[in-house]
Image (spheres, grey):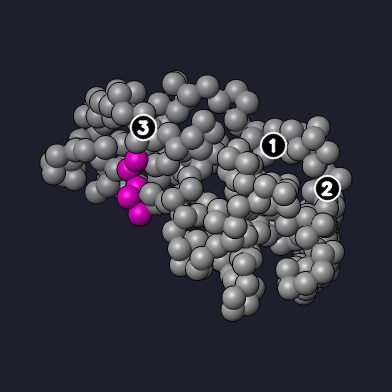
Amino acid sequence: MSYSSEDETDISDSEMEEYVDRCYEQLKVETQKLKFSDTLYRCPYCPGKKKIVYPFKDILQHASDVAKGSQNKDIKHKGKHLGLVKYLKSEVDHEDLSSELTALTLVDQQEGNGVKDLFVWPWMGIVANFESVSKLKDVLAKRGVDAVRVRQLSSGSKYAVVEFKKDWSGFYGAIMFEKGFEVVNHGRKDYYSPNLSDELLYGWVARDGDYNSDGILGDFLRKNGDLKTVGDLENEEKRKNGLLVADLSNTIQELRMRLEKNNNYHEQD
């Protein structure tokens, strides 16, 4: 999205609303600057994040955070992101996108790949038939894949492992990575079909079939990961959060007891 150099100067608070509206109207015209796919978006105002794509709730959070965090000297940067917030809330149909992760899980569940499916944890993707790690990184970046690391299993191996963040955003990224290959018939089942093309990339999320397989791929996954279901991880997260709450409650209770003891001591004096 293009703006003149004067956009980098400060504007008064009285001009903010007008500027936000102008950014909002320009986004309505130049939607291709924002929309990466039907469910993924890029921030048109953060050049350094061009390769990062967000689901709706995350691009909205990003725009809101930048707007809140901008200081007076960055008032136009704030105005642009406020215009983006207005556009997202007014023009994007996000009824089903606000809980995209849940929707993806439910879809997979209906297909037999849901909370009972065994994934390799931490989340990992597998790419077959790649030429080099550097070229593969370029391909993944162009597809908007937010990978933590890409590793070739060994010299001459036809497999590479794509590592994702160890949280739910990493799970979302892994699922989107897999679906990107599935929509062009380059998923796991296509790779193991008789019509395999050795010249094309194939990709999927690592699951129990890969983990328990013979050879270098299975060895790597067993050495670097475990098998867990989404349900397992949800329960672990709830348990950890419960322990944190319990620890905090115990600490507060202990402090109260010390305070009361200290007060009683001074009262006796």
CA gap between label 1 and label 3 equals 24 Å
Image vertical order of residue 35 relative to residue 182, above or below: above
Q: What secondary structure is marked by label 3?
A: helix
Where does label 3 land, which residue? 32
In the shown orientation, is residue 127 left or right of residue 266?
left
Where does label 2 land, which residue? 117
Q: Residues within 10 Å of mark 2 (few under 14, many from 20)?
A: some
What residue is shown at x 62% (from left), y 60% (from top)?
128
Q: Earlier in the sequence, mark 1 or mark 3?
A: 3
Which residue occupies the foreground of this view, 15 or 31? 31
Q: Label 2 is placed on what type of residue?
A: Asp
Examine the residues drawn in magenta and state their main secondary structure: loop
CA gap between label 2 and label 3 equals 36 Å
Which residue occupies the foreground of this view, 232 or 155? 155
Q: What secondary structure is marked by label 2?
A: loop
The spot of residue 254 in percent (x, y) is: 82, 64
Q: Label 1 is placed on what type of residue?
A: Leu
What mark, if any, has residue 251 been given in the picture? Answer: none
What residue is shown at x 51% (from left), y 37% (from top)?
40
Residues shaded magenta: 44-48
Can the viewer see residue 245 in this picture? Answer: no
What residue is shown at x 82% (from left), y 57% (from top)?
209
The spot of residue 198 in percent (x, y) is: 59, 57
Image vertical order of residue 252 relative to residue 82, above or below: below
Q: Residues within 10 Å of mark 1 (few under 14, many from 20)?
A: some
Can the viewer see residue 145 in this picture? Answer: yes
Q: Earlier in the sequence, mark 1 or mark 2?
A: 1
